[in-house]
């Protein structure tokens, strides 16, 4: 793939640009444990790609929670902010890749399923907000991933046609969202989704173990 073919790049956040997926299972276990509930083995797969709000609805209905949706989301936000601000690093090579794209004047956006407060926390903690021309959460669109809504929305914000965008994702639902939007998609390796690697490789256009590999091997 030639770099000259790409007019915009859109990143998923958790597990793709930042190494944060480890903490969400821990938060789910703690959150449910405080209510005397076990964390089901299928939970992460069931909520894959859902927006922050959609996930709250799912939890409320599946676990029959008395809390309001806003109370659920507020507690998750409190539980995650310290980790996002102090324990979540960029994925290997991500900083160099963002600088590479910036140096080549390629607009960048973020299309995340996460909540706005957590997105703000990690972008500011890692000092990467200035790289992005648009940052959007799936709560701003009609449907979360695997629907294409969030990718189409961010492409519109960047002023780039979807077919001229390259998307980066770490889970199948996200890859499907990017492909449904008409974009080429690079699947990024992530320890959390190791068991899904075969599916990710099948769904995506390209595979990368880290962002240095993208610069050195995928862009020719």
Image (cartoon, helix red, strand yellow):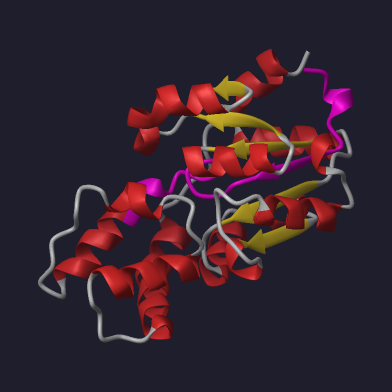
Residue 128 showing in the rendered view: no
- Quadrant position of the C terminus in the picture: top right
Residue 180 appears anywhere in the view: yes
Up/down of 53 relative to 146, above or below? below
Residue 211, position as x, y percentages in the image: 61, 28
* Magenta residue check for 101: no
Which of 192 and 51 lies nearest the eye of the viewer?
51
Q: Which image quarter: residue 203?
A: top right
Q: Height in image: 120 above or below 16?
A: below
Q: Is residue 16 magenta?
A: yes
Residue 148 shown left or right of residue 202 in the figure: right
Q: Is residue 107 left or right of residue 48?
A: right
Question: Seen in the image, is 126 located left or right of residue 159?
Answer: left
Q: Which residue is at 41% across, 65% downward?
A: 55
Percent across and percent down for residue 164 are 84, 35
Residue 116 against residue 179 in the figure, above or below: below
* Identity of the residue drawn at 21% across and 60% down: 29
Residue 95 x %, y %: 64, 38
Quadrant of the image occupied by residue 4 = top right
37 on left or right of 181 = left
Q: Going 67% across and 33% down the picture, which residue do you hit? A: 96
| Point 15% across, 75% down: residue | 35
Q: Identify the magenta region.
A: 1-24
Image x and y of residue 94, in percent? 61, 36
So how many labels did they put on this image?
Answer: 0
Based on the displayed image, in which of its 4 quarters is residue 69 positioned?
bottom left
Q: Quadrant of the N terminus?
A: top right
């Amino acid at each position: 793939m030639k770099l000259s073919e790409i007019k915009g790049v859109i990143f998923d956040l958790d597990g793709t640009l930042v190494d944060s997926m480890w903490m969400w299972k821990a938060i789910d276990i703690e959150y449910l444990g405080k209510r005397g509930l076990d964390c089901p083995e299928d939970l992460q797969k069931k909520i894959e790609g859902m927006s922050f709000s959609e996930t709250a609805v799912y939890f409320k209905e599946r676990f029959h929670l008395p809390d309001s949706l806003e109370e659920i989301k507020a507690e998750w936000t409190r539980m995650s902010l310290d980790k996002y601000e102090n324990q979540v690093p960029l994925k290997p090579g991500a900083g160099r890749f963002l600088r590479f794209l910036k140096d080549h004047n390629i607009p960048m956006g973020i299309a995340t399923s996460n909540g706005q407060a957590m997105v703000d926390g990690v972008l500011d903690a890692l000092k990467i907000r200035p790289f992005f021309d648009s940052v959007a959460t799936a709560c701003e669109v009609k449907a979360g991933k695997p629907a294409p809504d969030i990718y189409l929305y961010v492409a519109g914000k960047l002023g780039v046609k979807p077919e001229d965008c390259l998307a980066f994702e770490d889970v199948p639902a996200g890859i499907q969202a990017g492909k449904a939007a008409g974009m080429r998609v690079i699947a990024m390796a992530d320890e959390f989704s190791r068991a899904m690697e075969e599916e990710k490789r099948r769904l995506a256009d390209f595979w990368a173990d880290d962002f240095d590999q993208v610069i050195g091997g995928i862009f020719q």
